[in-house]
Image (cartoon, coloured by chain):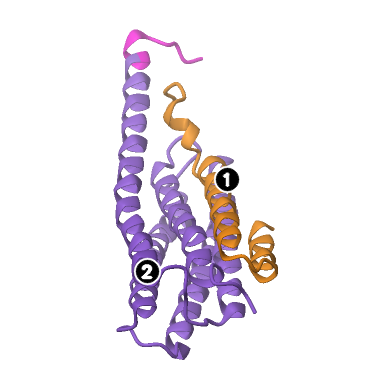
Amino acid sequence: VLTIVEYIFAGEVDDALIRFIGLAIASLAKAGLIVYYFMHIYQLWRREEAH
Amino acid sequence: MAIATPETHATHHDEARMLAMKRAGLWLFFFSECILFGLLLTARFFLAGIDAEPLDQEVGLAITVILLLSSVTAFSGETAIRKGRNAAASWWFAATIALGFIFAAGVAYEWSIAHFSRSDPFGTAFFAMTGTHALHVLSGLVMFILLLPHVIRGRYTAKNYFAVQAVVMYWHFVDVVWVIFYPALYLVQGVD
């Protein structure tokens, strides 16, 4: 969904600086969601547990 | 009924420590890869500013959605292993491999229709970024292809699946890189 939002945002916003900042925020948010929910980065700080 | 002795407790503790060390090592590898991809991203803006040559936006959007979908299938495969459903995991990983190949084919197609040269500032950045990323996609595909027969044979269980988790995490990392590269290459100059 965020990718589609990014795509539409890039097409609608004419100001290059606002477009750059908006896309940077959206892409970092997406990367953060993947790192947290898919890559389980929180496991690095969790108590040890065996599989 | 199993009786917990000091020895079994110590073994379990050692396994847990080993797993934590493997995870930390994997993350250190990802951080080292971030330096490589960060340098490429920096070089892209240093060489071409926020300007970019026109690219096929439909292809860019399509391959991005395909790579994100492949992350979902990889995650579903890992979840299936954790729940002891190896047959389902095999199908999810097979789907991930198929989507990965479609992504790689999309990048190859984009290269074939690119009307700019690799000697242009943007062309240098574009081919270096997409080429390095595509090599990581291909290495991830090789890992999935090597993993799949073991998953089909039921080698991994809910208690022993770090190899699966490592390959899936690598795939997610490749996805994270593309999530940053896609707007930097395709969207930052605007979409007509």
Q: x and y percent of residue B177 in the render?
A: 44, 58
Q: Residues within 10 Å of mark 1 (few under 14, many from 20)?
A: some
Looking at the picture, tell me which residue is in the foreground, B116 or B27: B116
Instruction: Tell me the kind of residue under disc 2.
Output: Met
Instruction: State yes or no: discs 2 and 1 in contact (Cβ < 8 Å).
Output: no
Write the residue at 60% across / 62% down.
A19
Q: Is residue B6 magenta?
A: yes
- Taking the spot 36% from the left edge, 41% from the top edge, the residue there is B27
- The disc placed on residue A33 is 1
- Label 1 residue SS: helix
Q: Position of residue B10 (x, y in %)?
A: 32, 15
**How far across and how far down the image is residue B52, in percent?**
47, 76
Place of residue A13 in the rendered image (x, y in percent of width and height, measured from the top left): 67, 66
Q: Which chain is orange?
A: A
Query: In this picture, is A13 found above or below A22?
Result: below
| Amino acid type at mark 1 | Leu
Q: Residues within 10 Å of mark 2 (few under 14, many from 20)?
A: many
Q: Quadrant of residue B14?
A: top left
The span shown in magenta is: B1-9
Palette colour of chain B: purple
Q: Which mark is residue B129?
A: 2
Q: Chain of mark 2?
A: B
